[in-house]
Amino acid sequence: MKTEQEKLDRQLEHFRTRCAETGLRVTPQRLEVYRELLRAADHPSVDMLHRRVRRRLPTITPDTIYRTLNTLEKAGLAVRVSAVGNSARFEAGLVRHHHFVCRACGGIYDVYSKRLDRIHAGKDLPAEYRVDTVQVEFRGICPSCAEPHPEC
Amino acid sequence: MKTEQEKLDRQLEHFRTRCAETGLRVTPQRLEVYRELLRAADHPSVDMLHRRVRRRLPTITPDTIYRTLNTLEKAGLAVRVSAVGNSARFEAGLVRHHHFVCRACGGIYDVYSKRLDRIHAGKDLPAEYRVDTVQVEFRGICPSCAEPHPEC
DNA sequence: TTATGTGCAAATTGTTTGCTATTTT
DNA sequence: AAAATAGCAAACAATTTGCACATAA
């Protein structure tokens, strides 16, 4: 059985490896931001991360957190949750459906599927969580962006 | 067989009914924003909607679009797509998982499930769409917010 | 008539960027 | 030593809000 310390060490090792592969420098700021991400279970925002990391690195600024997160995201070390681009998007939402989001152009395409509509939480979520809607989100590259000419 | 015109009429009728139920006034601005939402297939942003609605209501401003969308959302006439609150949220993303989002407090909870992991696009999406990730998003009310004391 | 909603301007908040000094490699 | 990066300030972008006039009910 592995201790928590061993687990953390393995994760930080992975961090260093990935940085080396991507040609990224291992700076104290990046290390601390990543460490907080590993520790956090609440999907922190930039502001939340800034407050936490500042305890160890008092001089760190929000813009460094922004830059660091964008960098980590590109390196596959952080995942941006539930946000397409930087502005909200809307629909009339009359018929139940799902979404495909292109990570190149930010386009959102509707996916209609009885099969996907039938998906439910079942035992995967404690009964106390009252589920109102279930949505499947596919992410990838849309046909236009996949074409040789990147004129999406 | 129903004509497009009949369909639109039915949808606008639904709009009026819902407004009456919610005690909302049917203003030209709201009508046009809703009409554009019905017509749009591309999940427009506030800016996109503003440009389109302005063709019919030249004096309308972006802040009216913002207010209108928030109002329509509360009335269940519009759906905000892929955004939790107004700032990006992050995670280390080491293990594949899904999310439950509380629409009261904005909290994000991880859901681990082999069953959900196995979901794929199949024939529901044209083969030209290259899918990289599949994620299920549950939305509803978390246990803390469901409690009588709303101290979430 | 009256409460609600719009338009305008200004304030807030979230995010990015240019520059210089600093630091990792 | 060289290239990448952090911190600072300032720019930029998205969204919200206070207020006076306009308008749907």
Image (tube, coloured by chain):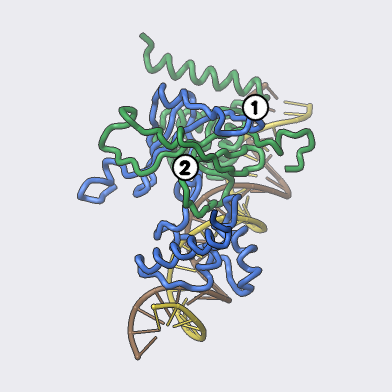
Chain colours: A blue, B green, C yellow, D brown
The answer to whether marks 2 and 1 mark residues whose Cβ atoms lie closer than 8 Å is no
Q: Residue at x 62, y 23 (%)?
A: B19
Percent from the top left, x then y, of residue C3? 75, 30
For residue B24, the mark is: 1
Could you classify mark 2 by the number of other residues whose Cα lies within 10 Å: few (under 14), some (14-19), or many (20 or more)?
some
Q: Nearer the viewer, residue A124 or A150?
A: A124
Q: Residue at x 66, y 68 (%)?
A: A55
Q: Quadrant of residue B145?
A: top right
Q: Nearer the viewer, residue A110 or A37?
A: A37
Q: Residue furthest front?
A: A1
Tell me: residue A60, above or below residue D15. below
Residue B28 seen anywhere in this rendered image of the structure: no
Q: Quadrant of the C terminus of chain B?
A: top right
From the viewer's perspective, tell me whether residue A111 is left or right of residue A148. Answer: right
Residue B102 seen anywhere in this rendered image of the structure: yes
Q: Residue at x 63, y 68 (%)?
A: A54
Q: Measure the C-alpha gap from mark 2 to mark 1.
A: 23 Å
Mark closer to the observer (2, 1):
2
Secondary structure beneath label 2: loop
Q: Nearer the viewer, residue A62 or A8?
A: A8
Percent from the top left, x then y, of residue B148? 78, 33
